[in-house]
Amino acid sequence: MADRPEPATMPAHMPDVFDETCSARHALELIASKWSVLILSALGAGPARNAELLCRIGGISQKMLTQTLRDLERNGLISRCNFHTARPHVEYQLTPLGDSLSETLTALDRWAERHFPALDAAREAFDARESEE
């Protein structure tokens, strides 16, 4: 594989997500999950319990919610707060790292909400062209 010249504006020690060995790709993989995006956006409104997240995020299974929460916690984007009360009470909230990402993800959510009709129309037009061929 030929070496790609580095852009003049990027110091040699900077991560490059286009490099297959760059660890930043793990971050992209984590936050590219629709469930991660939705959970982080939901927690942007404040701490929430598991059941609240399950109700708020339509279509997510308990298994997927639990798995994604664990992944986000493992990567430092959320924290799990266990309140040791008579009835067990666990809440999830954004960490400062997760909070720094939340604004960007909320903007992505709003973009999707604004532009889904255009995306739907493009898919329909493409499918119609494909079925004619």
Image (cartoon, grey):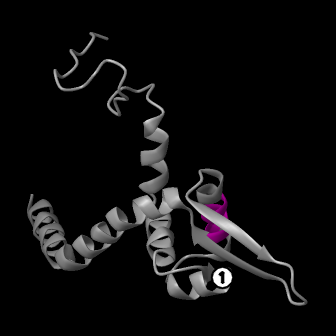
Query: Residue drawn at (22%, 19%), measured in percent from left and top?
Result: 6
Specify whether residue 67 is painted magenta.
yes
Query: Residue drawn at (46%, 81%), measured in percent from left and top?
Result: 45
Q: Is residue 25 left or right of residue 60?
A: left
- Position of the N terminus by quadrant: top left
Give the prevailing secondary structure in the magenta stretch.
Answer: helix
Query: Residue drawn at (41%, 55%), measured in percent from left and top?
Result: 32
Q: Secondary structure at mark 1?
A: strand
How far across and down, in percent of the image, does residue 41 sit?
43, 73
How far across and down, in percent of the image, does residue 83 sit?
80, 79
Q: Residues within 10 Å of mark 1 (few under 14, many from 20)?
A: some
Q: Is residue 116 left or right of residue 14?
A: left
- Position of the C terminus by quadrant: bottom left
Magenta residues (range): 64-70
How far across and down, in percent of the image, does residue 65 sit?
62, 71
Residue 72 occupies quadrant: bottom right
Please state which amino acid type lies under the numbered disc 1: Arg
Residue holding disc 1:
49
Q: Which is nearer the eye, 80 or 124?
A: 80
